[in-house]
Image (cartoon, helix red, strand yellow):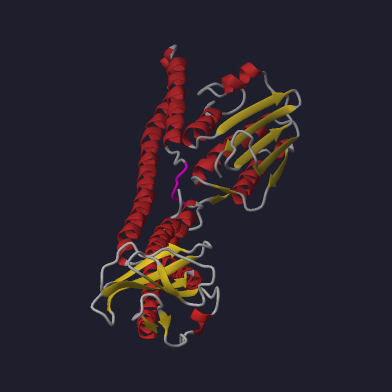
Amino acid sequence: MRSLNSRVLVAAGLVLAAFLSTAGFVLDQAFRDTAQTSVRERLTGRIYMMLGMIDLDDPEKISANSTPPDATLSTPESGHYAQVLDASNNRVWNSPSMLGITFEGPGDRTVGEFSFADTQSSTGEKLFVLSYTIVWEGTGSESSLYTVQVAENERAFRAQVARFRQSLWLGFSAIGVVLLLVQTVIFRWGLKPLRDVAIEVNRIERGEKGEISGEYPTELRALTENLNALIRTNDSSLKRYRNALGDLAHSLKTPLAVIRTSLDREPALGTGHSGLRASLDQLDSTIDYQLQRAAAAGRSVIGKSIEIEPIVEMIVSSLRKVHADRGISIVTEVEPGMKFRGDRGDLMEMLGNIADNACKWARQAVVVKVSQSNDPDVKAHLSLKIEVHDDGTGMPEDDIARALLRGARLDETTAGHGIGLAVVKELVEEVYSGRLVIKSSPAGTVVVMIFDDY
């Protein structure tokens, strides 16, 4: 769909084109009528001139009393002609310019009225012809009916109209271009607040800003203020939700710790001791899982993006201290400027769980890579890829599937509740609509988190 600016420009351009075309057609027709009226008036003057020159007293020998003052009537093929016809439309006199040329008489012979028409000469020349019929009272008692005709070639008229039409449309085209440029400037200036809002919203989506801060016209002020209120409400609701979860965790963990301590101090509980402790461990694991799952903020369309490199360095620094006695080498490879569109806590939860597992199973080395790649499965956008490699002994396919189940632990001697990978899987695939891929071989294990549309 076109942008608002282009839609308005197209609509204005169509209206302008329709207006200029209509105005051009009207002006063209008006000039044509004016030019034709000018031709008719010029021919009318020639008829009066001919009436003053022609001697009609002798019907057998009509002649001109003087040479026509217009030299074109004396020049053959000049395009200007005159003739006198009798009542039977027989030519009784013609100007010297009509050498070898004839054209038809008028169809309407009303006495005392001018008749203007288009006709064609015997040589194919297109002519404007003006006819005037009179009754001539001769020397005797009889009167004669005569028609005086003057004609003019249409070439001059058509050339004049063509010159005007060319000037008209060139002028209108120039005016149209100038008006379109002026309209473009006006529309860009008028729609600038909308573009500014779009730019600010885009920056908020990319995480570069927290809210809309520009000054906008009254028509947009309600939109920007409500959008800022929505952003603040979203942040406030998330904070209250997480605080409530923290309070819930504290209220549940404390009684569980008291019960576990009491069990340690009361060995007299006998056979029920181990079963009760296992139930408490299961309850503790379930609470941890549900709290981690519910606390996930997920990807927000409106919110700041998180710089990934500082978080990777912080997690790796902690893991180096935790696993210092094993001498594990942890290497990071993070492309500059990589950002995560989501919650900082969620990223730490996902990356921390995977990196910690890699350190537990690695023999000597762990590599954490963060990159942006052209994923063939996602054609329109780039993907954010976070990879964690370890050089452990790997695990079979069945164990990979079991490791992603909540509460499953592949090695009971390793500390933990067995919920880390399950939480990571739900965060990646359900909360952030990404993909979690685990590839394992005897040479090691690779865990890849892929987040599309980054």
Name the spot of residue 403 as percent of width and height, x first.
58, 23
Quadrant where the C terminus lies?
top right
Residue occupying image coordinates x 63% and y 53%: 337
Quadrant assignment, res 26: bottom left
Name the spot of residue 110 as percent of width and height, x first.
26, 68
Vertical arrangement, residue 114 with respect to residue 52, above or below: above
Nearer-the-camera pick, 409 or 136: 136
Nearer-the-camera pick, 370 or 153: 153
Residue reaching furthest to the left = 141
Residue occupying image coordinates x 41% and y 35%: 294
Q: Is residue 266 left or right of residue 443?
A: left
Does residue 337 appear anywhere in the picture?
yes
Q: Which residues are magenta?
A: 299-303
Name the spot of residue 287 as percent of width and height, x first.
42, 30
Vertical arrangement, residue 52 with respect to residue 133, above or below: below
- Magenta span: predominant SS is loop
Q: Is residue 70 left or right of residue 324?
A: left
Residue reaching furthest to the top = 271
Residue occupying image coordinates x 66% and y 52%: 336
Quadrant assignment, res 416: top right
Vertical arrangement, residue 406 with respect to residue 29, above or below: above
Quadrant assignment, res 315: top right
Name the spot of residue 195 as percent of width and height, x first.
44, 61
Q: Is residue 360 left or right of residue 55?
A: right
Does residue 412 appear anywhere in the picture?
no
Nearer-the-camera pick, 176 or 49: 49
